[in-house]
């Protein structure tokens, strides 16, 4: 069957609602008698709470409740460990999860201390000013290396030190590889990442209907089913009694996958107590402190090579800032550890990381989720090694690419999905070649020299990356043909702009021969579908897409079976297209899908034993492991050597994510990823003071790239299908963001010929000021 | 707090409400009038999600008090389409080029661009990017938004 | 991020506005375009008890050109209007050149020149431009009217010579002599951000090409907009050669007192000051014909 819908650039089903202001976001939910929450947050990074006096706040007109940790009684308990660490021998993991309201100690600026419920958000904020909270500041843990010192203050006084986790993983025998090496290149790297800053902050509305005995929660979560199950357990309700709706979500990028944020736990609780609907919408200031970040790692890494430049092994030892609590386990550092190996054949690897508690906001995955750090280390090591060996930076990469006949390629160490890291499929050299051709690598030396003669500094960057995508455990989907002939698809994942209403509709339309516009997709409503895990790790299209495909296949066979009975013919003689079933070669003998659905759901007579009414099926899909996408980015920049401001002249992405479901949506995912990568590389950095205060908690000071900072990108694709799922697809959500730091570092070095001056870029993010310091030694 | 009567037109319809002086226009549109198409992204005038048109000019509704709109004409995203179930040329161009993903910044961008195109019928890509520079989008990388604006401009010129 | 409560007055006449301000003093703030004040109120950094809204006051938004090429700008003139004013573009092109760097179109549509100046953010472009243009400000109160030179107006970060009962009512820009050239250049992290450094330059040359007058001022260069009188003086009497400009820029580097920020170290800012002064002076010289 040739594809009718899959692979076509179909415009999105969801757009008309979004474009006309008719899409429901959480803050759009209005209920009669709606109350509003605001939170008193710690002004200190680390302090003992001496007292919290709420009397004046409670007395303010319009205030219904002021809640402190004491008021929570048995409901006060640390949040769950969302992602337990995989079973890696010898590892250390010390779990400390966030609490709903700080009771004795605050451990980061912005940690909630009290909740106010009032008739309006305005009054609730007035009441925050009435609360008198007294603190005794404690010494602050900020710097990762200082945090390891025996004399360092401790984030959690009951732990012996600030080490949240320590993991060592090995592939092959690095010591032996090192002993054989002709060259060993050792470097120290710092890679910092910022905050995801979705344009919609977090928010939650909870409505307890005492008569129906049901709680409805609208939540900006990427994981509605998990929130439903967890809230039911916490509140002593059955799962049936809780409906969680993740409506249109204004961007997620990972931090909305974090579950049971304090506000998420408290707002439903107070709504039930007051028997009034309650809304909390995080404001942008709160967002900078209260929504999780991704942050700094310091790597000490070395690469061992033979005389030709072939990699013999890599050793890495890194520290990672995990913030004040670690409910998300080891996902980020494991991603760094695994993705460092990148698309190269590395026979021996030895890697240790230590996750460090600091008095800062929690760290959980944000688009790329630690992969950036790993790719940066490997790509920078290769650049340094190429110089040491006198090799071209492209040739050292080409020499070390995993060859196409080596798949599945086993890296042996354990990945975030608990499975040994294995690349399912890949063909990397064509990716590199396409990127080189598109960026004009062959002619660049001449171009650079010509520009230099005019006093202009051009630099080129070319880097490779892989992205582990589409991990399990599973997602599900239910497909039904309605009497109208339209098809519904319901799945448990949430959607934050990825185009699921269209891409999943394409998958279903492909099987059922209906128009994509006639497939109505519901995501993120536990009353519609309540099995599932969530939208993260570039897995929506892969895992929910495959589940949709499987369910649609079952419905297809039901349709054909029913139509064969109806026409008294063989199934093989039937054609399913244009929303109807016809007898091949006799197009006038046909029945519309809606009519068939009605026949399959009769009001009288009997549904035959062993069959089910209707044209409906539910299927689940769980891949044994993740699918590995790959790509290369190349860029030419012009750098003003006086102001250190870069201008991107050309930007090329070559990406391989297997079968493409919708090239329009794919392009959008990649372009958006690159924009966030550019932000990470050159604009966005959370700036902390010694006292643990965030110095740039506003959108005027924390710099998201604008339309003038992100260039036009040229996209190319290669297609190496994944053998792990029926669609052959791989995830594409994060790839665009992953290699951009390494790309900037290389291109800037090239533009200013820094290595010839003995200067290397060993850190991200950069800025004009920082770059000027690096070049002029004003560190 | 003393409440003040505000009478204004929104998308051509007259509204009158008594409000506190401190009520932001963005909250007034969303809560008091139920026009939730205007989104709030930062409440300090940087992100542009709340952009509306006040007497034709694109402005941040989070930096204006509702009382200040008394006697003025406001236009929001809800007023762009010619009718229910229809899209304006600009909105259609955004769908055709995949100029939105999560859609949260989109209403603000549409209001900014609708004002921009009235004064710049045949803009260059550079001009479009300047016009968009006060609206943050975290999903798209802007490229398809730029494409949408250029496509809309072309279609509007052809229709003129 | 919702503002604290306040009493709101929206007078139609300036006398009424001044009387209100006189009555409420420091408890009250004038609300002009609100593009700096309202964010501060949303963060609750500013919590004025009274707002005297100037948006309905008649006669405060005009732009009037004198026959001699001078300009009189009402404090409530929206920045977008000043930026697009055809006469101002001819008499004082520095205004539009700098205004294009001030935030974004939507902010300039609402923000006013007077509000920007009265806010007195040392990182803001327009205070430095006013120094370079030798502006005078008309300050009005119920007590009367007085004029203050821009050079005497900006006292400290967010602090001006305005008394609690006074309003910045008008901006007076003297005409530029023939063969004057002006330029504004800044480096910001992103277009529209506050500059890490910005330089406004005004040069006048005589028929022989000798510099007869120079004024230079910088933003983000100290606690107030920073004039560079020594650098300017060094140019007077020269032909404004590359060397002359380099010497002046080196002097300017010493005159600025950048304080550093999250975005830029003081050392980098000083370096930028010299780079941008060189560029701005070169451009102003080319335009001084």
Image (cartoon, grey):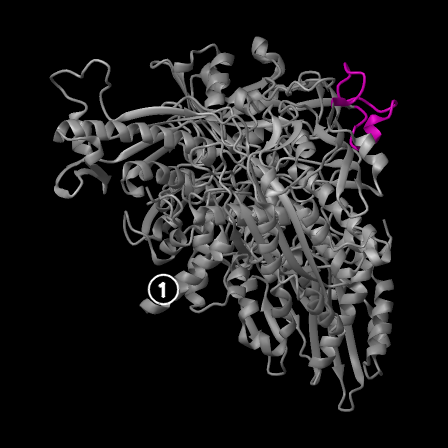
The residues colored magenta run: A138-166
Q: Residue furthest bottom?
A: C208
Label 1 resides on the chain identified as: B
In this rendering, the count of numbered labels is 1
Front in this rendered view, residue A651 or A123? A651
Compared to C20, does A627 lie above or below? above
Measured as percent of width and height from the top left, residue A652 is found at 58, 56
Left or right, residue C148 beside residue A690: left
Left or right, residue A374 beside residue A142: left
Residue A689, visible in the rendered structure: yes
Measured as percent of width and height from the top left, residue A382 is found at 75, 46
Q: Secondary structure at mark 1?
A: helix
Measured as percent of width and height from the top left, residue B60 is found at 51, 51
Front in this rendered view, residue A24 or C65? A24
Q: Main secondary structure of the magenta part?
A: loop
Task: Name the image quarter holding residue A22.
Answer: top left
Q: Is residue A639 magenta?
A: no
> Mark 1: few, some, or many residues within 10 Å (few <14, many ≥20)?
some
Locate the N terminus of chain A and report the quarter of the image it occupies: top left
Tag 1 residue: B155
Measured as percent of width and height from the top left, residue A457 is found at 73, 65
């Amino acid at each position: 069957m040739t594809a009718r819908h899959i692979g076509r650039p179909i415009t999105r089903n969801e757009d008309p609602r979004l474009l006309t202001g008719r899409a429901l976001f959480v803050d759009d939910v209005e209920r009669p008698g709606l109350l509003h929450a605001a939170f008193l947050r710690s002004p200190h990074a680390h302090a003992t709470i001496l007292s919290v006096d709420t009397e004046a706040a409670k007395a303010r007109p319009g205030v219904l409740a002021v809640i402190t940790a004491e008021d929570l009684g048995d409901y006060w308990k640390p949040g769950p460990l969302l992602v337990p660490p995989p079973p890696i021998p010898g590892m250390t993991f010390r779990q400390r999860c966030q609490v709903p309201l700080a009771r004795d100690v605050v451990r980061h600026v912005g940690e909630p201390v009290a909740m106010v419920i009032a008739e309006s958000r305005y009054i609730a904020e007035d009441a925050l000013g009435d609360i008198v909270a007294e603190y005794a500041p404690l010494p602050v843990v900020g710097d990762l290396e200082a945090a390891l010192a025996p004399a360092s203050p401790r984030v959690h006084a009951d732990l012996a030190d600030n080490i949240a986790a320590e993991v060592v993983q090995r592939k092959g025998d690095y010591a032996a590889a090192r002993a054989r090496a002709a060259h060993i290149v050792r470097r120290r790297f710092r890679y910092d990442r910022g905050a995801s800053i979705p344009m919609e902050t977090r928010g939650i509305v909870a409505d307890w209907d005492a008569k129906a005995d049901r709680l409805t929660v609208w939540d900006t979560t990427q994981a509605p089913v998990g929130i439903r199950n967890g809230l039911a357990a916490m509140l002593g309700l059955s799962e049936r009694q809780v409906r969680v709706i993740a409506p249109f979500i204004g961007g997620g990028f990972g931090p909305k996958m974090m579950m049971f944020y304090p506000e998420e736990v408290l707002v439903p609780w107070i709504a039930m107590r007051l028997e009034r609907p309650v809304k909390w919408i995080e404001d942008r200031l709160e967002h900078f402190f209260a929504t999780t970040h991704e942050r700094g790692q310091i790597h000490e890494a070395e690469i061992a090579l033979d005389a030709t430049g072939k990699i013999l092994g890599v050793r890495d030892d890194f520290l990672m800032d995990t913030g004040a609590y670690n409910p998300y386990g080891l996902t980020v550092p494991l991603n760094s550890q695994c993705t460092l190996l990148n698309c190269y054949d590395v026979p021996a690897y030895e890697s240790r990381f230590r996750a460090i508690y600091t008095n800062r906001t929690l760290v959980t995955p944000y688009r790329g989720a630690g992969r950036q750090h790993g790719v940066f280390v490997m790509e920078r090591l290769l650049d340094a090694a190429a110089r040491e060996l006198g090799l071209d930076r492209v040739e050292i990469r080409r020499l070390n690419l995993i060859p196409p006949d080596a798949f599945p390629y086993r890296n042996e160490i354990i990945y975030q999905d608990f499975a040994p890291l294995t690349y399912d499929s890949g063909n990397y050299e064509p990716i590199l070649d396409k990127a080189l051709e598109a960026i004009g690598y062959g002619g660049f030396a001449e171009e650079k020299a010509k520009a230099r003669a005019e006093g202009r500094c051009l630099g080129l960057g070319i880097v490779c990356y892989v992205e582990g995508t589409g991990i399990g455990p599973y997602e599900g989907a239910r497909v039904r043909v309605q009497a109208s002939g339209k098809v519904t698809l319901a799945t448990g994942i949430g959607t934050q702009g990825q185009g699921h209403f269209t891409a999943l509709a394409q998958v279903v339309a492909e099987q059922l021969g209906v128009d994509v516009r006639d497939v109505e997709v519901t995501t993120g409503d536990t009353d519609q579908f309540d099995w599932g895990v969530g939208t993260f790790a570039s897995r929506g299209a892969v895992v929910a897409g495959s589940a949709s495909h499987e369910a649609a296949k079952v419905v297809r066979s039901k349709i054909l079976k029913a139509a064969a009975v109806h026409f008294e013919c063989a199934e093989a003689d039937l054609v399913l297209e244009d929303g109807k079933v016809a007898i091949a070669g006799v197009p006038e003998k046909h029945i519309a899908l809606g009519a068939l659905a009605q026949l399959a759901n009769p009001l009288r007579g009997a549904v035959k034993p062993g069959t089910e009414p209707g044209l409906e099926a539910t299927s689940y899909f769980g891949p044994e492991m993740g699918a590995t996408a790959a790509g290369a980015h190349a860029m030419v920049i012009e750098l003003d050597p006086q102001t250190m401001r870069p201008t991107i002249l050309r930007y090329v992405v070559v990406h391989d994510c297997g079968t493409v479901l919708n090239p329009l949506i794919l392009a959008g995912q990649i372009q958006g990823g690159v924009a966030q990568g550019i932000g990470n590389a050159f604009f966005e950095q959370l700036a902390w003071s010694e006292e643990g205060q965030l110095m740039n908690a506003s959108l005027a000071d924390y710099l998201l790239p604008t339309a003038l900072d992100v260039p036009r990108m040229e996209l190319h694709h290669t297609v190496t299908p994944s053998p792990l799922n029926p669609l052959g697809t791989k995830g594409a959500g994060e790839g665009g963001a992953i290699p951009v730091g390494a790309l900037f570092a290389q291109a800037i070095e090239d533009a200013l010929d820094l290595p010839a001056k003995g200067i290397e870029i060993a850190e991200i993010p950069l800025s004009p000021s920082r770059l000027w310091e690096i070049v002029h030694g004003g560190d | 707090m003393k409440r003040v009567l505000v009478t204004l037109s929104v998308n051509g319809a007259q509204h009158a409400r008594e409000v506190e002086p401190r009520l932001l226009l963005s909250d007034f549109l969303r809560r008091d009038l139920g026009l939730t198409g205007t989104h709030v992204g930062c409440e300090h005038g940087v992100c542009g999600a709340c952009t509306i048109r006040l007497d034709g000019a694109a402005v941040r509704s989070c930096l204006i008090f509702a009382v200040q709109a008394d006697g003025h004409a406001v236009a929001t995203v809800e007023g762009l389409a010619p009718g229910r179930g229809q899209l304006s040329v600009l909105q259609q161009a955004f769908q055709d080029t995949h100029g939105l993903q999560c859609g949260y910044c989109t209403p603000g961008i549409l209001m900014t661009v609708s004002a921009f195109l009235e004064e710049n019928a045949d803009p260059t890509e550079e001009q479009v990017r300047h016009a968009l520079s006060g609206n943050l989008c975290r999903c798209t990388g802007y490229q398809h938004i730029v494409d949408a604006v250029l496509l809309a401009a072309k279609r509007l010129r052809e229709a003129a | 991020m919702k503002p604290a409560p306040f009493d709101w007055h929206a007078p139609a006449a300036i006398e009424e506005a001044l009387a209100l301000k006189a009555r409420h003093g420091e408890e009250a703030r004038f609300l002009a375009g609100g593009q700096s004040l309202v964010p501060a109120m949303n963060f609750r950094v500013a919590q004025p008890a009274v707002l005297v809204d100037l948006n309905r006051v008649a006669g405060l938004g005009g732009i009037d050109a004198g026959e001699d090429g001078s300009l009189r700008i009402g404090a409530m003139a929206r920045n977008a209007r000043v930026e697009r004013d055809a006469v101002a573009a001819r008499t004082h092109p520095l205004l539009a050149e700098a205004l294009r760097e001030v935030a974004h179109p939507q902010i300039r549509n609402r923000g006013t020149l007077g509000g920007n100046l009265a806010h007195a953010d040392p990182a803001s472009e327009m205070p430095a431009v006013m120094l370079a243009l030798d502006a005078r400000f008309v300050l009005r109160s119920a007590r009367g009217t007085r004029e203050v030179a821009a050079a005497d107006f900006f006292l400290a970060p967010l602090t001006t010579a305005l008394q609690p009962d006074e309003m910045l009512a008008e901006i007076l820009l003297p005409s530029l002599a023939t063969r004057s050239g002006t330029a504004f250049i800044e480096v910001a992290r992103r277009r529209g951000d506050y500059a890490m450094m910005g330089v406004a330059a005004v040069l006048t040359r005589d028929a022989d090409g000798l510099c007869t007058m120079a004024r230079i001022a910088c933003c983000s260069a100290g606690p107030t907009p920073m004039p560079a009188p020594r650098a300017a003086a060094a140019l007077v009497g020269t032909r404004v050669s590359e060397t002359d400009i380099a010497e002046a820029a080196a002097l300017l580097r010493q005159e600025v007192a950048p304080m550093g920020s999250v975005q830029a170290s003081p050392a980098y800012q000083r370096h930028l000051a010299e780079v941008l002064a060189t560029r701005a002076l070169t451009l102003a010289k080319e335009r001084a014909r």
